[in-house]
Amino acid sequence: MAKTHLVHQFGMGSSIRSHNYTEAAARAIRDALWHNSLNVADAFGFPKEAMLIDVEIGVQQPEAVNTEALLGIFPYGQPQISVVRGGLDVDKPGGGGTTVIANAAVIVSFEMEPRHD
């Protein structure tokens, strides 16, 4: 069977005051997920646990993201999280700190037999 991508979802999250990369990443994931109500597993007759969920997070300091903490966001499926350099760090005027912005791409796939016409 082949891993077949069915859904791509995108989100953005920020940490305005605490400069917390994990918090910004979590908000980006939730933004991607909560904007959609997809019943992909049901539509294809798969259990929700069979969902293969690939998550890519972009932040300016990838090493500052706790990926283990992000796994708890997913109520089912098999999430895999990678963090790359991306997103934005935006300095506040007057030296009042930095806002962290994270971007998330969430791809949902299943192991499926290829269709032969």
Image: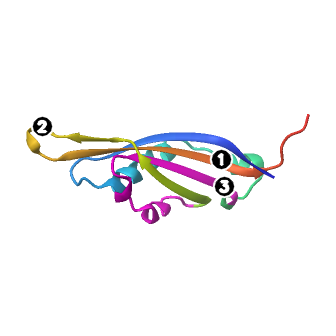
Give the residue at the far top of this rendering. 117
Q: Residue at x 57, y 44 (%)?
A: 37
Dot placed on the residue nearer the N-terminal end, 3 or 1: 1
Mark 3 to mark 2: distance in Å?
43 Å
Q: Is residue 26 above or below residue 35?
A: below
> Seen in the image, is 72 located left or right of residue 61?
right
Q: Secondary structure at mark 1?
A: loop
Q: Is residue 30 in view? A: no
In the structure shown, which secondary structural element does the residue marked by tag 3 occupy? loop
Say which amino acid is labelled 1: Asn
Which badge, 2 or 1, comes first in the chain's sequence? 1
Q: Residue furthest left?
A: 94
Q: Which residue is mark 2?
A: 93
> Residue tagged by mark 3?
51
| Magenta segment boundaries in residue numbering | 50-75
Residue type, mark 2 in image? Pro
Left or right placement of residue 108 versus residue 71 in this view: right
Mark 3 or 1: in front is 3
